[in-house]
Amino acid sequence: MISPQLQRGFFLFLLAAVSVAFFWILLPFAGAVLWGVALAILFNPLYKWLLVKMGKRRTLAALATLAICLVIVFLPLSMIAASLVQDVATVTQRLRSGELNFVTYFQQIAGALPRPVLNLMDRFGLGNLESLLTKLSAGAAQGSQMIAQQALSIGQNTFDFVVSFFVMLYLLFFLLRDGADLSKTIREALPLARPHTHYLLNKFTTVIRATVKGNVVVAAVQGTIGGLAFWMLGVQGALLWGVVMAFLSLLPAVGAALIWGPVAIYLLASGALAKGLGLVFVGVFVIGLIDNILRPLLVGKDTQMPDYVVLISTIGGMALFGINGFVIGPVIAALFMAAWSLFVDSNNGSAVHGSKDSAPPF
């Protein structure tokens, strides 16, 4: 007879093996799965509202929610992407032809700097303008080549992107329709106390919703305002720089100032005082304050993590997982803090954060 301990040990080994194999199979579509789950969590309240209006017909409500998601999210993104490709091609061509020369811009800025600032640059070893210009030329050339390579890579990977996109839509439909049943299955399968399970799953859901709804909306607004400001000032590639500002806005404490700041300095140094001061005003009092106004309204104070944790987890997540890391990083950080909070409370005999009445993730 085989002992029960051996049977259970082999079963646990088999369970772990097939679980790892399943996630390994999903690995090529990890981004599609991530965004399918994130959008399902974000649009779940709309699905529930449509479900009531449509007489509890889950399939019809899920299809309607998916259609609204396509109109609200993917149609604008596709239009922006089409314009962005053209803008990137134009900027790249101007960089290669020398019409757009960052070295010349730096020379104009350096020539307008007062003597005390130049002396300060000398102290830090930045006074050798020829060396700096050489480095800037090399950097501009490398940047132009990198942009061209990325554009070529996007063209070559179009088929993979299309497949991942439809996988995400397919998964989104079923997560909307059957998400409640899946959430119940996960809660019952996890070998944790029920209050702990509710607390961790709700934390996961809350951070996903807060990150996508809060950070993405804030980044989109900041990038839109920055791009419009560049367009009104006649800056070449306004759409491209607006997208870059939106991307950088995902990084707390860094933000879009890395783009509009140097442009404002150039405008001031080149004598365009009105344009430079106008851009500084927009950057500081419009773009800079959006984060402080919109983020608390969209995210909520109860889901905020310390700024340094958000910054480190976002940068680390993006370094490891690319663009998907701005969601994965904060989620891992939030679950890390939540798990340790539960551990400390259980050791101290405190009440558990979660409760049996907690709302399910879907």
Image (spheres, rainbow, N blue to C red):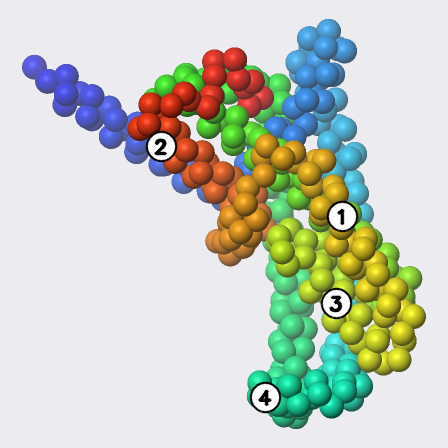
CA distance for labels 2 and 1 = 36 Å
Q: Earlier in the sequence, mark 4 or mark 3?
A: 4
Which residue bears the numbered disc 2?
A: 344
Horizontal and vertical percent position of residue 128: 63, 92
Left-right relation of 268 to 306:
right
CA distance for labels 1 and 3 = 16 Å
Which residue bears the numbered disc 1?
A: 290
Does any portion of residue 97 appear in the rendered image? no
Task: State the mark number for residue 123.
Answer: 4
CA distance for labels 4 and 3 = 23 Å
> In this picture, is 206 found above or below 249?
above
The quarter holding residue 125 reads: bottom right
Question: Which one is closest to the eye, mark 2 or mark 3?
Answer: 2
CA distance for labels 1 and 4 = 37 Å
* Front in this rendered view, residue 329 or 144: 329
Q: Earlier in the sequence, mark 4 or mark 2?
A: 4
Horizontal and vertical percent position of residue 340: 39, 36
Horizontal and vertical percent position of residue 4: 14, 17
Give the residue at x 76% y 65%: 260
* Front in this rendered view, residue 237 or 202: 202
Packing grade of label 1 (10 A; few <14, some 14-19, many >=20) is some
- Quarter of the image that includes the N terminus: top left
Amino acid type at circle 4 is Arg
CA distance for labels 4 and 2 = 50 Å
Q: Earlier in the sequence, mark 1 or mark 4?
A: 4
